[in-house]
Amino acid sequence: MQNIFQTSKPVLGVTHPMIADMYVKKDYKSKRSNILVIQTRAIDEDDAVNATEQDLTDLLLDLEDIKRKAEDKIGKFDSVCIRR
């Protein structure tokens, strides 16, 4: 059964090495807020210690540019959620 209070729309054409998926979630329970959800890619166990910190730092440093590109594609959003 689909939740009528929450829908999502994929954000296409915005890429980054750490991003596996990106979409805008509309949560009508929370005053119709638009949330940009960034799903990070999985990291191999062998690389986890060294790669994770540097990759996440790169993602955070590029976040303003990513947000601008996403806004150009799908319009304004109210907040950003980064998930593993």
Image: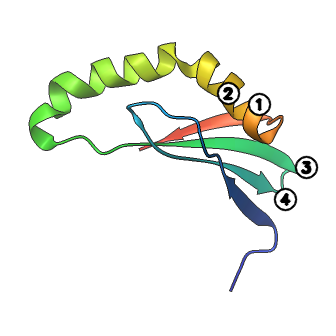
Look at mark 4 in the image and give the residue it sits on.
Answer: 29
Looking at the image, tell me whether mark 3 or mark 1 is earlier in sequence order: 3
Look at mark 3 in the image and give the residue it sits on.
Answer: 31
The amino acid pointed to by label 1 is Asp
Instruction: Tell me if mark 2 has few (under 14), some (14-19) or many (20+) residues whose alpha carbon lies within 10 angstroms of its own.
Output: some
Q: What's the CA distance linking mark 2 and mark 4?
A: 27 Å
Extreme left residue here? 46
Q: Are marks 2 and 3 in contact (CB under 8 Å)?
A: no
Looking at the image, tell me whether mark 2 or mark 3 is earlier in sequence order: 3
Give the residue displayed 17% in from the left and 42% down from the top.
Answer: 44
Look at mark 2 in the image and give the residue it sits on.
Answer: 69
Q: What's the CA distance linking mark 4 and mark 1?
A: 25 Å
Q: Tell us which disc is closer to us: 2 or 4.
A: 2
In percent of width and height, residue 62 lies at 52, 17
Residue 72 is marked as 1
Q: Tell us which disc is closer to us: 4 or 1.
A: 1
Quadrant of the rendered image containing residue 26: bottom right
Name the quarter where the C terminus is drawn. top left
Extreme top residue here? 61
Q: What's the CA distance linking mark 2 and mark 3?
A: 24 Å
Q: Tell us which disc is closer to us: 2 or 3.
A: 2
The amino acid pointed to by label 2 is Lys
Extreme right residue here? 31
Q: What's the CA distance linking mark 2 and mark 1?
A: 5 Å
Give the residue displayed 74% in from the left and 75% down from the top.
Answer: 3
Q: Toward the viewer: 14 or 45?
A: 14
In percent of width and height, residue 58 lies at 40, 17
